[in-house]
Amino acid sequence: MVSTRQTTLAAVADGPRRRPRTLRYRVLFATTSVFKYAALVFFSGFFVLPWVWMISTSLKNPQELAVWPPIWIPNPIRWDNYVSAFRQAAFAQYVINTLIVAVPSVIGAVLSNALVAYGFARVRWPGRDIVFAVVLATLILPGFVTFIPLYIIFRKLNWINTYLPLVIPAWLGSPFFIFLLRQFFMGLPLELSDAARVDGASEFGIFWRIILPLARPAIAVVALFEFIGSWNAYFGPLIYLNDKAKYTISLGIANMQTSYGFMNFAWIMAATVMSVFPIIVLFFFAQRTFIEGIALTGLKG
Amino acid sequence: MLVAKRWQGLTRQDRRALRTGLLFISPWIVGFLAFRIVPFVMSFYYSFTFYPVLESPKWVGFDNFLTLARDPRFLSSLYNTAYFAVFAVPLGTIAGLLLAMLLNMKVRALSTFRTIFYLPSITPVVATSLVWLWMFNPRNGVINYVLSLVGIRGPGWLGSPEWAKPALILMSLWGVGGAVVIYLASLQDVPRELVEASQLDGANTARQIWHITLPMISPVILFNVIMGLIGAFQFFTEVHVMTGGSGSPADSTLMMSIYLWQSAFRFFKMGYASAQAWVLFTIIVIFTIILFRVSGRLVYYGGR
């Protein structure tokens, strides 16, 4: 303990960034490094294994599914499974249906949440902070409390078995996105709005022409998360869609598993891989948006 | 009356600002009333009714709640949900923190590791569930194969009432990457001076983590624990996909959310299901309050 203290003090005396390269330090440094990377590789194994298994299974022959020990590299590799997903089940239809939900949801989420967040961040009105507290409180309101009445409301509106229950709520603001965009809007300098106001711009004009273009990074986060939300959604489609021809991708794939049994698992896995693929591609194109977005949402809580 | 009085007290400028503000937030107001408040109140009312969808609701007082207290399936759904939450939330928090701290140790190829950890958390849950369903297969699944390599005879996992819940918990850890990214970002925000000062005072790594790092990021941990708990209480999709909505074997994975869904959409007992929803809601509120109370002493807000 004493010796560490002395070396650290010496390091400080030398300068802020330099450390003494004593033998003891080097040994310590090397062991931590080895330990650190060993741990990282070990945990990565746990995270990578399902991907390998998923892809491997998607390329197997039905006979190879039930073999022990498991086969990692199928022989021959059955690319055919990816075609079967289209032929045996309505994979293409599911993708189209999902896009019919996702595209208008993304547009609605961006527009509505930006408007609402602007009202909370850049218009100073009496009672604003109380109302915003209500917005935050709804964050912990579980969906399971409201879904039965919602189902009944949508049934009375004749919206069951249509995409409206999946799209319309996206146009009416979500507390999570409002919070995220508000944080971003508040960070933009007030002088921008003041200058525009002097020039006679209306509040909506300021929002549309000045603030919105500046908020592109935050809007990208909202669009991305809303798209992934629609793509991955299961519960909503499950209760609101009855007609198999209307199923979205997640529901469609879950349905393949219950309709076809064990022997069809290879091409079902192929369909699963294809359902994950767009999300992965999206991630690699927008990696920074993702990481910044998710850090942003968790940090200021 | 009160509103009118307040309105009188406002200056002209305030009134205009109020009108503009409300106009901007009007989408949220509509959504809040139509999709949150109205259903919330309706759900409370339904929980006191007998409501088989096709007929109109009939008032039955506390009957639904009394039936719930004696319904063995509901009680096991309570137990299963609690079991899942008690293990999945703390394990997820510890795993998330551990991985984030590892990544914060000046790691080469940081973004590669971060991607490896993060990707599962944005993967469609249905895809995740199907892959793990297949991995957990006791006879030729990869999990028991890996266990057999180290000489362990793996259990029946999702086919066995004792091992089905541990299987779900293990699977839930695969999605811990979102928390890792959040924790990592907050770890990178911990001021270097503080860590260096503690080194000067002779603190070893463990004490540094315990006395500096963890307190500094404690608000983020609290936020994630609360969100994790709310998520755990509503754990649904994985079980629905993996068990075909049944909560099998022997109701061992029958979560509160699954039983609620069954009551509403298999047995069409909307009133009974609403009563369950309100029990679930009450539990979530109580736990959130407890967490806030307890954390009042543990969380450091840095004068913010």
Image: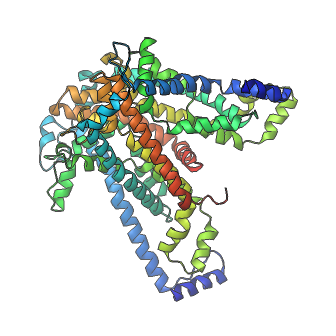
- In percent of width and height, residue A279 lies at 43, 36
- In percent of width and height, residue B262 lies at 29, 28
Residue A280: image quadrant is top left
Quarter of the figure that contains the N terminus of chain B: top right
Residue B254: image quadrant is top left
Question: Which is more toward the observer, B101 or B40?
Answer: B40
Colour scheme used in the picture? rainbow
Residue B11: image quadrant is top right
Q: Is residue B278 left or right of residue A112?
A: left
Question: Which is more toward the observer, A78 or A284?
Answer: A284
- In percent of width and height, residue A128 lies at 70, 35
Determine whether B171 is above or below B71 in the image. Answer: below
- In percent of width and height, residue B123 lies at 39, 40
Q: How many marks?
A: 0
Determine whether A165 is above or below B283 in the image. Answer: above
Determine whether B280 is above or below B271 in the image. Answer: below
Asked whether residue B61 is in view, the answer is yes
Quarter of the figure that contains the C terminus of chain B: bottom right
Q: Is residue B241 left or right of residue B17?
A: left
Asked whether residue B187 is in view, the answer is no
Q: Residue furthest front?
A: B61
Determine whether B119 is above or below B246 in the image. Answer: below
Q: Is residue B16 left or right of residue A117?
A: right
* Residue pictured at 53% horizontal, 45% vertical: A294
* Residue pictured at 16% horizontal, 34% vertical: A262
Question: Which is more toward the observer, A100 or A74?
Answer: A100
